[in-house]
DNA sequence: CGCCTTTGACCTGCGC
DNA sequence: GCGCAGGTCAAAGGCG
């Protein structure tokens, strides 16, 4: 209990360095808690750590609303400040809270020289008891506040997800207009959804990516929203609207490999046959699923925790790299299509390369918003770049220009079978941490600045957890 | 008991 | 057609 309170005071002293007596002990413990150092980056470290410091990092990370740092940090700071002042007003004894029993007892005994040691002991015990009661009460308050912050965080994350999706839809609308014009020129050259047909597909438009997850081979190609009868029968779990937009997953079971609708997610990533007669937004979404975001970060941990829950489903030795590549899929929701690959860099084993693919089809905890937003934004941007360049390749000039202010290195690989954005966070992570609040409140409507925001938050998240 | 990891087998696309 | 490489599945076992 004393630990909790002490840590709470640390966070306060960290925020309000005008603390008087407890400052020394605060500073010492500050070093013991590495998370506190990250406070400017991730609010919930200070919010939850006083409670969860002994629970483990995983639970902490799952709750870290890295993405909405500024929003919540402001709120939480105010709350804690109020508590702090209130406590000071009521209990000036509390300034020595984290020092408590040992110091109090020793001071008393040395000064009074044992004349009334029993009385002093009783008094000390009473004080301790009072402090313990007070601690309990404060813990309860902390818990309440924590719950409140969690609620707000969840609401915020849900809203942000919604916003991201709206933005993507809006952008897709614009893209579709262009695509329709292009498609009108392309359609005569391809018919029907003959998936096995030889593609001879050029690098032209990722929009030719497969959308067969909703229209398996042989299904009528002209339906926008309705799944084919075959697909409908295979679908066991009703998917949300988001899911229908972004997920080709069924129930996680492969029904038939030759027509497995999910296998196109990663397994058929080179299969870019596209039915031009299919709805363009479907093609866009399929393309976005294939867009990858690769994050390079230095980490001794086997995997950076990005706030999501992952389940490992495979591991392979990749050619040219002595380190195995691990495959994970998101398990936060049934049928979430998001997958990631984790592999150490062959040249520098301390660098962890995490590649994300797909968009989550479920609400995310705040800590997961950064990476999820990054993935979604990258997919959108890649698509946008392909549209603007018109040849399926991302315009490489767009991205570096937007990313450099965020002091991370981002590159786009157009030569890969699928568009990939690589974020290199191995150079100046700290700069990212302190730039993030500035970019956090960028007005998101310009696409460029939105990317900057999302990638910056991702960088901070990866650094924090890595 | 449920969830997770491990790991060999399998599938698919691609190059020769 | 064959082999290779990437990706995925699913049974078996471990763990809390
Ligand atoms: Zn997910």
Image: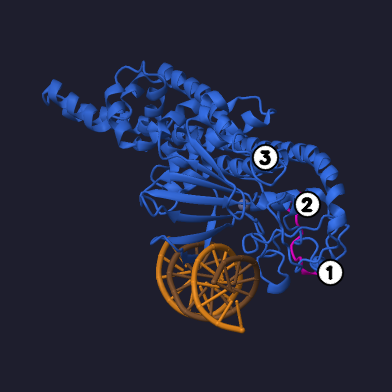
Chain colours: A blue, B brown, C orange
Looking at the image, residue A224 sits to the left or right of residue A460; the answer is right
Q: Nearer the viewer, residue A455 or A202?
A: A202
Q: Is residue A242 magenta?
A: yes
Residue A218 image label: 1
Q: Chain ID for label 2?
A: A
Mark 2 or mark 1, earlier in chain: 1
Q: Chain ID for label 1?
A: A
Q: Are marks 3 and 1 in contact (CB under 8 Å)?
A: no
Choose top left, top right, bottom left or bottom right for residue A333: bottom right
In magenta, the rendered stretch is A233-245
Choose top left, top right, bottom left or bottom right for residue A19: top left
| Residue tagged 3 | A385
Neighbours of disc 1 within 10 Å: few (<14), some (14-19), many (20+): few
Neighbours of disc 3 within 10 Å: few (<14), some (14-19), many (20+): many
Q: Nearer the viewer, residue A266 or A368?
A: A266
Q: Quadrant of the N terminus of chain A?
A: top left
- Up-down: is A89 above or below A430? above
| Residue tagged 2 | A282
């Amino acid at each position: 209990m004393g630990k909790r309170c002490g840590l709470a005071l640390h966070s306060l002293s960290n925020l309000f360095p005008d603390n008087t007596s407890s400052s020394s002990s605060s500073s010492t413990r500050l070093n013991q808690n590495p998370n506190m150092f990250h406070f400017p980056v991730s609010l919930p470290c200070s919010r939850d750590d006083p409670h969860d410091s002994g629970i483990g990092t995983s639970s902490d990370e799952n709750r870290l609303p890295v993405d909405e740092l500024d929003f919540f940090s402001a709120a939480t700071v105010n709350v804690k400040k109020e508590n702090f002042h209130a406590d000071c007003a009521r209990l000036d004894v509390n300034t020595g809270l984290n020092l408590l029993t040992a110091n109090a007892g020793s001071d008393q005994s040395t000064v009074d020289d044992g004349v009334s040691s029993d009385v002093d002991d009783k008094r000390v015990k009473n004080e301790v008891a009072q402090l313990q009661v007070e601690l309990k009460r404060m813990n309860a308050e902390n818990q309440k506040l924590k719950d409140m912050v969690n609620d707000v965080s969840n609401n915020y994350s849900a809203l942000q997800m919604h916003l991201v999706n709206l933005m993507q839809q809006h952008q897709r609308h614009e893209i579709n207009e262009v695509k329709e014009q292009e498609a009108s020129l392309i359609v005569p050259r391809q018919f029907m959804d003959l998936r096995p047909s030889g593609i001879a597909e050029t690098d032209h438009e990722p929009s030719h990516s497969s959308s067969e997850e909703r229209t398996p081979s042989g299904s009528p190609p002209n339906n926008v929203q309705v799944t084919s009868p075959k697909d409908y029968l295979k679908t066991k779990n009703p998917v949300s609207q988001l899911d229908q937009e972004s997920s080709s997953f069924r129930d996680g079971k492969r029904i038939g490999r030759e027509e497995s609708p999910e296998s196109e997610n990663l397994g058929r990533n080179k299969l870019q046959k596209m039915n031009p007669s299919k709805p363009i937004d479907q093609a866009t979404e399929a393309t976005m699923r294939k867009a990858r975001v690769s994050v390079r970060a230095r980490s001794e941990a086997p995997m950076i925790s990005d706030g999501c829950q992952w389940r490992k489903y495979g591991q392979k030795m990749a050619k040219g790299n002595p380190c195995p590549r691990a495959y994970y899929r998101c398990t936060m929701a049934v049928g979430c299509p998001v997958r990631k690959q984790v592999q150490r860099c062959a040249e520098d084993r301390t660098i962890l390369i995490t590649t994300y693919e797909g968009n989550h089809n479920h609400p995310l905890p705040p800590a997961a918003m950064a990476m999820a937003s990054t993935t979604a934004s990258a997919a959108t941007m890649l698509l946008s770049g392909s549209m603007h360049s018109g040849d399926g390749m991302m315009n490489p000039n767009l991205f570096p220009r937007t990313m450099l202010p965020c002091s991370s290195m981002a590159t786009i690989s157009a030569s890969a079978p699928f568009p990939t954005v690589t974020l290199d966070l191995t150079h100046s992570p700290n700069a990212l941490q302190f730039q993030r609040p500035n970019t956090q409140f960028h007005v998101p409507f310009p696409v460029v600045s939105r990317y900057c925001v999302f990638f910056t938050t991702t960088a901070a998240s990866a650094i924090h957890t890595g």
